[in-house]
Amino acid sequence: MNQLSRYGRVFLTFARNSLVRDMTFRLNFALQCVSSLGWTAMNVGFYLIIFEHTGSIGEDTGWDRDRFFLFIATTWFINSIVQAFFMPNAEEFSEMIRTGGLDFALLKPIDTQFLISFQKVDWSQLSNFFAGAAIAAVSLYNLATREVDPMVPTVTSVVLYCVFIVCGVLMMYSLMIALSATSVWLGRNQSLYNFWFYITNFSRYPMEIYNHGWGRPLFGFFTFVIPILLVVNVPARLLAKPLDPRAPWEWGLVGWAALVTVAGVIASRMLFRRSLLSYRSASS
Amino acid sequence: MALWNTILKTSLGERLVYRGDFALGTLMRFLPIITQIFLWYAVFDAIGAAEGDNPTEIGGFRFRDMVAYYLLTMIARAFSSMPGLASGIARQIREGEIKRYLIQPIDLIGFLLLTRVAHKLAYYAIAIGPFALVFFLCRNYFVDGWPPLPVFIAFCGSLVMGFLIGFFLEATIGMIGFWFLEVTSLLFVLMLFSFFLSGHMFPLTLLPDGVEAVVNFLPFKYLAFFPAAVFLGKIPEQDLPMELAIEAAWLTFFIVACRIAYVRGLKRYSGFGG
């Protein structure tokens, strides 16, 4: 317990230091927020245009405008957390390996994975968290007040939603740690981070859209091998659609997501520790 | 002439060093198109028929046209995108490197244009592999096959002009560095706008009518939408000469604007030290 509160204090220090650094260049910080919000606005515009032409994403999938925007909000929640807390550190990590700065991280009397995962916080990315909240609020309101098929999520589904958002973040984190670990072996891997970006691109849409033709292998691969389709889909479905009735496979998917989260965190930690054993310092 | 030849050769060599990483990176850039294919299939499927004899149209695009459109914008962007050009010019102004062009008998804009041509040529030499592969795999999305020769010539013309508009537009923005030292955030905003308004995100015909009219009036569409629309025959053949003439007018505008900004900027500029 003592150990846990110590790590908590260290993390708070990291977060405070990053905030102090961000606040030193306030205008720059504001501009960073504005540009991420601009990117969000552009995406919202794109989806609004799509819904000018269609009533839902896919026939009989139930992803109409309000529900789909809840999906988008979920994507935004998870991505903003990942980009605020883990992305800057993962970028730093491959640089540390190349320059030998990892030596200093290994010497410190603290868990190395913890240190390299949380050292920096990019606070400006959290602006998208609030953008996500705004999108979620509007679509929940629309969903509750519309005339056709209105819906108010139950307390259970909201609780489950929050739990599986955390799971989604942990899944993304595991993937990132696993990719970071490979950079120990490969020296430097710029393309791998592009790879991360392109792969997570698949998680941005309801999984039903892959369920035809040559999408099925992709569907299977990204559900069972690299389960990024679960990251957003599982929490978004829990909130956006009534909990009852659900097909058995849907609950199976929820269970699978929980299992994958635990397994992913453990596996990526093992992979990370192994990779550290093959680290050959670059300095001195 | 020998001087320009040397510049071209050096830049080519510079670019060919990392070709393996380059080819792989190019291939990966097509990955987001896969999600676009499935997204649009779902959209078309929801309102009518994505495939078959009587496919539904959105903004004049059938499902297969839509995929072909995204693929073609990749080509258009390969010509018109200028990574690092404006920020490079602004940096050279800030750090005083620009003095070099005042002393040496080389014109800054000419030099930058030539290095850019060389970079692009080197890029195409390697990127043609992955591009050919992806287009071959996706050949079925091009329902009408190759366009007739005049349209194809117009397509090539729009690509070349797209490259030049991209270059002079960015160079002009870079010249703003003479007035404001830090232009990064301005560039980011411009990049966002251009991503949306060039049609890289979706065909511009999907926009609501009023908005579409305004966007059509802006030069951004030549960076992605226009070449793709020409290739797919979405612009009537009789309108092509006029449309290309308007594009040429925009190009002339940016060439002049860039030159004026450079000359004006140099008057403000004062270089110190060595």
Image: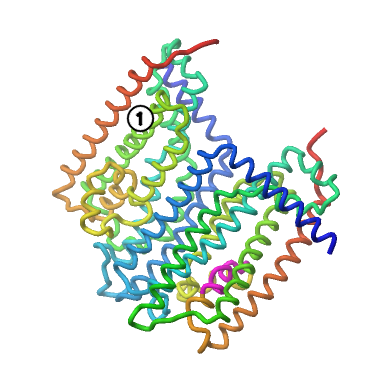
Identify the amino acid type marked 1: Thr
* Left or right: B199 as drawn, with respect to A228: left
To which quarter of the image does residue A171 belong?
Answer: bottom right
Please check the rendered image and state whether residue A231 is part of the magenta-colored stretch, yes or no. Answer: yes
Please check the rendered image and state whether residue A243 is part of the magenta-colored stretch, yes or no. Answer: no
To which quarter of the image does residue A103 belong?
Answer: top right
Q: Is residue B131 above or below residue B1?
A: below
Q: Is residue A263 above or below residue B259?
A: below
Give the dominant element type of the magenta stretch: helix, strand or loop.
helix
Percent coordinates x, y for residue A66 in the rendering? 40, 72
Q: Is residue B94 above or below residue A192?
A: above
Percent coordinates x, y for residue A200 in the rendering? 55, 60
Q: Chain of mark 1?
A: B
Q: Quadrant of the N terminus of chain A?
A: bottom right
Span of residues in magenta? A226-236
Q: Nearer the viewer, residue A147 or B176?
A: A147
* Left or right: A138 as drawn, with respect to B241: right
